[in-house]
Image (cartoon, rainbow, N blue to C red):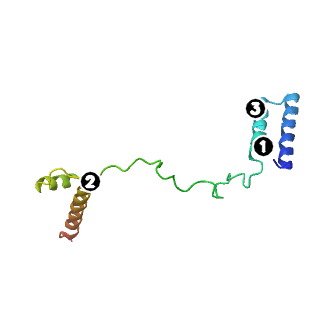
Amino acid sequence: FPESSYGAAAAGVAATAAQVAAGAPTSFVEAQKEAAANRRRMAGTDNLLAGGYIQGDMRTAAPVGRSSKPPPAPERMLPQAMLKAQMDNLGPVDQDRAAYLNSKVLGEACRDRNTQNRIFLG
């Protein structure tokens, strides 16, 4: 520890001991003990408020093969895509085909919505 930080922590502990002897309230004494312990622990750091998070101490990506996210869920078929697969007699549908059918029925729904005639009153 730097000399100044160690000296400040030692002075804080000594002051706390003196207050205990003088009969200070115990919660105040405990708070001062905790503050002195924190000063000793954080001595020598560059930025006591930020804790050095900005200097690049933290990792930006999880290591390969150990991601915290669960694996992606398999593609679920929309009800319209299920009906389309049944009507076209496709049989069992794999994940790629399910994604394709989902995008196809969504595209058809968007096209129908955007091309239908609108009724304007007034």
Q: Residues within 10 Å of mark 2 (few under 14, many from 20)?
A: few
Question: Looking at this view, is 109 or 4 the one in front?
Answer: 4
Query: Which element is circle 1 on?
Result: helix
Ranked by sequence position, the earlier of labels 2 and 3 is: 3
Three-letter amino acid code of the residue under disc 3? Ser
Query: In the image, is residue 112 above or below residue 102?
Result: below
Three-letter amino acid code of the residue under disc 1? Arg
Q: Which residue is mark 1?
A: 40
**3D distance between C-alphas at marks 2 and 3:** 63 Å
Residue in view at x 88 percent, y 28 percent:
21
**3D distance between C-alphas at marks 3 and 1:** 20 Å
Label 3 or label 1, whichever lies nearer to me, is: 1
Label 2 or label 1, whichever lies nearer to me, is: 2
Q: Which residue is mark 2?
A: 95
The percent coordinates of residue 94 (x first, y second) are 23, 52
The percent coordinates of residue 81 (x first, y second) are 20, 55
Ranked by sequence position, the earlier of labels 3 and 1 is: 3
Three-letter amino acid code of the residue under disc 2? Gln
**3D distance between C-alphas at marks 2 and 1:** 57 Å
Q: Are marks 2 and 3 in contact (CB under 8 Å)?
A: no
Instruction: Name the image quarter holding the C terminus.
Output: bottom left
Q: Residues within 10 Å of mark 1 (few under 14, many from 20)?
A: some
Residue in view at x 18 percent, y 50 percent:
92
Disc ID at residue 27: 3
Residue in view at x 31 percent, y 50 percent:
74
Q: Residues within 10 Å of mark 3 (few under 14, many from 20)?
A: few
Ranked by sequence position, the earlier of labels 2 and 1 is: 1
The percent coordinates of residue 68 (x first, y second) are 47, 47
Q: Are marks 2 and 1 in contact (CB under 8 Å)?
A: no
The percent coordinates of residue 77 (x first, y second) are 24, 52
Residue in view at x 84 percent, y 35 percent:
16
Label 2 or label 3, whichever lies nearer to me, is: 2
